[in-house]
């Protein structure tokens, strides 16, 4: 192995992770356009479909997004009528995000998104599960 092999693109784990992530998100775009959502708005909605409400700090932690990224995203979702943001009565610094009835209604329209994306990814269910497990192991070790 040569001195500079460690900095060759083909030897970097980060590059295929970056490239695959970018390409998968690109595949989401036409699907999510029909729902009038960006990918990041979609992942926020997935959390809220499950939890119904959460504070901004927990949402950011769950999605690995900082408040500078979340704030404009949440404003846009609020303008669309999918969420409402309110200050906590116990602690004004704590901003709580609540899903609205319209936001819950969007969940039904999103039911086929995973299947459509699954058709774009050439992995068996076993391979997909193995990759999922490895990615979360990696995320846990660096997160």
Image (cartoon, rainbow, N blue to C red):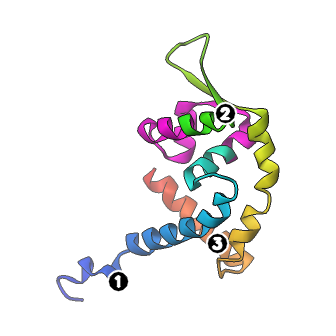
Looking at the image, residue 115 sits to the left or right of residue 123; the answer is right
Q: Image quadrant of residue 121?
A: bottom right
Q: Nearer the viewer, residue 78 or 12?
A: 78
Please report contact status of discs 2 and 3: CB closer than 8 Å, yes or no: no
Front tag of 2 and 1 = 2
Mark pair 1, 3: CA separation: 22 Å
The disc placed on residue 10 is: 1
Looking at the image, residue 110 sits to the left or right of residue 28; the answer is right
Q: Image quadrant of residue 135?
A: bottom right
Q: Which element is circle 3 on?
A: helix
* Residue 75 belongs to magenta span: no
Q: Position of residue 88 (x, y in %)?
A: 60, 16
Mark 2 Cα-neighbour bin, 10 Å: few <14, some 14–19, many ≥20: many
Residue in view at x 45 percent, y 73 percent: 19
Mark 1 Cα-neighbour bin, 10 Å: few <14, some 14–19, many ≥20: few
Mark pair 2, 1: CA separation: 43 Å
Q: Position of residue 57 (x, y in %)?
A: 52, 32
To which residue does mark 2 refer? 83
| Relative height, residue 13 to residue 62 (above, below) | below
Earlier along the polypeptide chain: callout 1 or callout 3?
Answer: 1
Q: Which residues are magenta?
A: 46-74
């Amino acid at each position: 192995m040569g001195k500079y092999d460690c900095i060759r693109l083909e030897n970097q784990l980060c590059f295929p992770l970056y490239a695959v992530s970018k390409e998968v998100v690109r595949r989401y775009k036409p699907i999510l356009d029909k729902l009038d959502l960006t990918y990041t708005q979609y992942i926020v909605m997935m959390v809220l479909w499950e939890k119904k409400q959460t504070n901004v700090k927990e949402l950011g932690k769950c999605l690995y997004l900082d408040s500078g990224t979340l704030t404009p995203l949440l404003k846009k979702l609020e303008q669309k009528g999918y969420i409402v943001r309110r200050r906590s009565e116990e602690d004004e610094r704590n901003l709580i995000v609540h899903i609205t009835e319209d936001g819950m209604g969007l969940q039904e329209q999103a039911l086929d998104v995973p299947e459509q994306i699954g058709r774009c990814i050439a992995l068996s269910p076993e391979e997909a599960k193995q990759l999922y497990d490895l990615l979360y192991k990696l995320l846990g070790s660096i997160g």
